[in-house]
Image (tube, grey):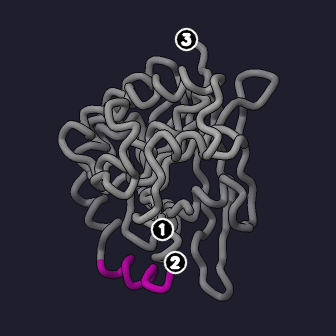
Amino acid sequence: MSAAGPAVAFESVNLKLGPTEILRQVNLRVQAGSVHALVGPNGGGKSSLFKALLGQVPHVGSISLQWPAEHAGTVGYVPQALAFDAGLPMTVMDFMAAMCQRRPVFLGLSPRWKAPVEQALRQVGMWEKSDRRMGALSGGERQRVLLAQALIPAPDLILLDEPMSALDEAGVETFEALLAHWRVTRVTVLWIEHDLDAVTRLADHVTGLNRQVLFDGPAAHTLTPQRVLALFSSRHRHDAAAVDAPADTAVVA
């Protein structure tokens, strides 16, 4: 089956914030239509690599998306957390409207987007709570809404920054169903995750990143105890201690 999503190539990527080295000589290839996980310690540059890919921070080296069709497709992004004023009278539907249209939120959701928004919220189990205030949701429910907004329009490449971190058991099942759907439809998934058991079970490929690539291979065989110990060892943490811990926490306003 041909891939709908692109291959992603990182070639000799270096990234600095002021004098601080965030990424060093990162060479990495994500296969088209695969579920590719990034693992590593906090401050190791995983979210910074996402930001470089999204064009949010300057970098040295090359990052290229190799689309299977002549025209570029859609890129979706799910941040690790949502920063907002919990007191705002913004409902789930208001949030979805703000994410998918330029029309002012107070005018409501455009008829064009009603069916896609309903479908996305149903996919993540949040349609019945679409009129609830965002500030009244649990952390796991807000994470589901973030997953829903990334489904509109349907992505060909999706970047997931620790999407399981706040999910309850039902939310994890929803996320795993989405991963299965993306795998069948050949969406390219680049996924930052700390749950190594989930990575071993659900990812096709895994890369260990702590400023630089420490290992790279099939998820089912690559996460050996020795490699994991080296990735999270105190020596590597000391090297990365000055690296951007805030930059590894993706937040959307």
Q: Secondary structure at mark 2?
A: loop
Taking the spot 54% from the left edge, 20% from the top edge, the residue there is 115
- Residue 39 bears which disc, if any? none
Q: Nearer the viewer, mark 3 or mark 2?
A: 2
Question: Where is residue 162 shown, x and y percent of the image?
Answer: 39, 53
Residue tagged by mark 1?
248
Q: Quadrant of the N terminus?
A: top right
Disc 1 secondary structure class: helix
Answer with left or right where residue 80 lies relative to residue 177: right
Q: Residue at x 46, y 37 (%)?
A: 148
For discs 3 and 1, the disc positioned in front in the rendered view:
1
The amino acid marked with disc number 2 is Asp
| Among the two numbered marks 3 and 1 on one chain, the one whose residue lies closer to the N terminus | 3
For mark 3, what is the residue? 1
x then y, percent, for residue 23: 59, 69
Residue 7 seen in the current view: yes
At label 1, which amino acid type do we have? Asp
Q: Amino acid at mark 3?
A: Met
Magenta stretch bounds: 234-244
Q: Earlier in the sequence, mark 3 or mark 2?
A: 3
Tell me if label 2 and label 1 are in contact, CB under 8 Å.
yes
Q: Position of residue 78 (x, y in %)?
A: 49, 48
Q: CA distance from mark 2 to mark 1?
A: 7 Å
Of 4 and 39, which appears nearest the observer?
Answer: 4
Structural distance between the alpha carbons of marks 3 and 1: 35 Å
3 and 1 marks in contact (CB < 8 Å):
no
Q: Which residue is mark 2?
A: 244
